[in-house]
Image (cartoon, grey):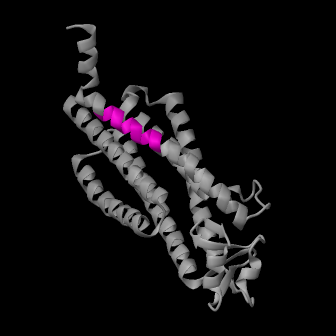
Amino acid sequence: MTLTNRFKSQLLNPHNIFRFFKYTIYMLLTYNAVLFFQEDLAASAQTFGDTVTWRNVIEAYSATFDTAAWVILLLLFELETAIIPDHLLKGRLKWLLKLLAGICYFFIVYSFWGYCYKYGVLTNLVPFVIDDVCSLIGTEYTYIFDLDDYLPLDQAVCTAMNGQAVMQISGTEIIGIEPALSEAIRLAIVDIVNASTWLIIVVLLEIEVFLQLKDRLTSSMMRAGKYIKGFFYAVLFICAAYWGVKGSFLDFWDAFLWLVAFIFIELNIFQWHEEVEEEK
């Protein structure tokens, strides 16, 4: 076999194609962290102004920290379940991975708090009384178009607002009318549900990895975990579908990629368990 044919054979090997597809998904999720940073940067300028400090930076950039921490945690799961051999997952390496995972969980839980905080900001509304909304064109005031989308007022928007009950997010220069505010609040609730559901799933995955390393993960446990996690994955699918209809494309695309990525982790654990059982 020539070198070229050997290269083609390796390239078209199903295992290598699968691995290429998997790591492409992981790279796309990494790029999403950059996109969420751009969104958070624009949104925090409106909701926090010049008051972003180290004390509230996670509240201001909750999606960025959340996504970055999840990407690192995903890679740690990949290392534990598919790359590093079992006999090496001990000692200093084991504790290093656990330390990194612990840092990720800190930011993930803190980001969950950031989503809850954002919901509190959006629901802290006060009436905004003004004779002509169009008089605010060119000022610092913006209107809420969608969750994290605060746009400058223009003639068409302010004309549509005139005559309607206008609300203001307390402590900010963001105004809006009931339909847009209600939709943003619903999306904030979906963020909270999505984040809390993922926390439950990774706890279940951590339990499976722990039991597998201790050689205590049984087939019946795997089946029970499949059904339990299946319910929570269904919740995540509903969140993704809602974002696809009501939210931004980035939210939907990111949710879809995460579901695919954790299918890979589930397959890793299944294959890992099967290999250990075969060795027995």
On screen, residue 98 versus residue 45, left or right, reads: left
Q: Is residue 25 magenta?
A: yes
Residue 58 locus on image (x, y percent): 66, 56
Q: Residue at x 50, y 70 (%)?
A: 187
Q: Residue at x 25, y 26 (%)?
A: 12
Q: Residue at x 29, y 42 (%)?
A: 267
Quadrant of the frame with the N terminus = top left
Give the camera-side residue of 261 and 160: 160
**Residue 198 sits above or below residue 75 on the image:** below
Residue 278 locus on image (x, y percent): 19, 32
Give the camera-side residue of 135 and 261: 135
Quadrant of the frame with the C terminus = top left
Give the camera-side residue of 73 and 255: 255
**Residue 229 sits above or below residue 3 on the image:** below
Is residue 66 visible to us here? yes
Is residue 74 visible to us here? no
Residue extent of the magenta highlight: 18-28
On screen, residue 264 versus residue 111, left or right, reads: left
Residue 68 locus on image (x, y percent): 56, 46
Q: Is residue 123 magenta?
A: no
Residue 83 locus on image (x, y percent): 39, 30
On screen, residue 235 versus residue 59, left or right, reads: left
**Residue 142 sits above or below residue 206 on the image:** below
Q: Residue furthest front?
A: 155
Q: Residue at x 40, y 64 (%)?
A: 244
Residue 180 quadrant: bottom right
Main SS class of the magenta portion in the image: helix
How many numbered callouts? 0
